[in-house]
Image: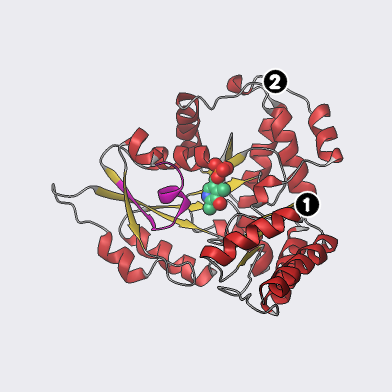
Amino acid sequence: MIDLRSDTVTQPCAAMRAAMLEAPLGDDVYGDDPTVNLLEATLAERAGKEAGLFLASGTQSNLCALLSHCGRGDEYIAGQDAHTYQYEAGGAAVLGGIQPQPIPWNERGELALQDIQRVIKPDDIHFARTKLLCLENTVGGKTVSLDYTHQATSLARNHNLNCHLDGARVFNAAEKLKIDVKEICQPFDSISICLSKGLGAPAGSVLVGDADFIQRARRWRKMLGGGMRQAGILAAAGLYALTHNVARLAEDHENARVLGEALSKIPGFSLAEPVQTNMVFLALEGDPLSALTSHLAEHRIKISGARWVLHKDVSAEHLKTIITACEAFAAERR
Ligand SMILES: *Cc1c(COP(=O)(O)O)cnc(C)c1O
């Protein structure tokens, strides 16, 4: 089976499983798990922050961040399609009484500075208190430039807002921009990083920030039921991923580029936007897309919509199978 639905579908390789089996463990709620402690410290160091917190998922990590930055009646600014706004079941509003203020992204995945400026609310009893700017990088497979990041976060700081980065795929962004992940993280107070996407771990995210912030987030994590015990068995997979699966993200980007280029040459296929990292967006919808989905399923290729995601379990060899199946589909429909 070739699965292009997401980079979350990766299977832990034999060496990652071995690392999990061998990991020294303790009760992490007591702070006793050496493997969790090492993962938290390692990722904090890589991101240039004081401390880290291991969480079950990216959603839990973003939620703990929002709850730690904002209180009841506060507000965070995020993209209209941001994960924190659109894909986390409204957790910040439901569980934290935190109001989202969504604004549109432009084609580069940026929130226009004038839009940010416009929605920051003055101190007035009619309004929620604007507390946080929340960005993403990568966003929809696109990298956001350091220049823009600095402008947006400076604007936020000038209004006393904190800044959070949903960096689910921040290592993809660093690879594409050819910079240290620290540089991307530097302007933010907190960053949430997923280990279970392109990095290939079975579960887990790490939230990084300063020590006080992480201490507050640790309390929220406990309250949300996210205090795990011998969690080092999972953290070991994350440590393995940080050692072995970061540099190889370049292969996923190259595979996405090759796939995008080949697909765009097939009659009836075109790309909705240029490939930047590990995602290919096809300009296909409705009936042709559902027919293509069934056709590919017959060739043991799984897709979910027009976003096709490359990851470590899709090889250059698999690309040929995918391209051949798409060519056959195009030929049949002519
Ligand atoms: C995947 C993802 C998350 C977190 O997702 P989980 O499935 O909860 O780990 C957060 N933000 C973005 C942009 C993501 O792609």
Q: Which residue is painted at 71% across and 68% down in the image?
A: 329
Q: Earlier in the sequence, mark 1 or mark 2?
A: 2
Q: Is residue 148 visible?
A: yes
Q: Where does label 1 land, which residue?
A: 313
Residue 108, percent from left and from top = 49, 71
The three-letter amino acid code for the residue at tag 1 is Asp
Q: Which residue is painted at 36% across and 69% down in the image?
A: 113
Label 1 or label 2, whichever lies nearer to me, is: 1
Say which quarter of the image contains residue 18: top right
The answer to whether 57 is drawn above or below residue 219 in the figure is below
The answer to whether 265 is drawn above or below residue 106 in the figure is below
Residue range of the region highlighted in magenta in the rendering:
75-89
Side of 153 where 138 appears, left or right: right
Residue 96, percent from left and from top = 34, 35
**Secondary structure under badge 1?**
loop
Q: Is residue 142 visible?
A: no
Closest to the observer, 315 or 92: 315
Q: Which residue is painted at 13% across and 49% down in the image?
A: 126
Side of 94 where 295 appears, left or right: right
Say which quarter of the image contains residue 306: bottom right
Side of 54 where 318 appears, left or right: right
Alpha-carbon span between mark 1 and mark 2: 31 Å
Q: Where does label 2 land, which residue?
A: 26
Residue 63, percent from left and from top = 45, 39
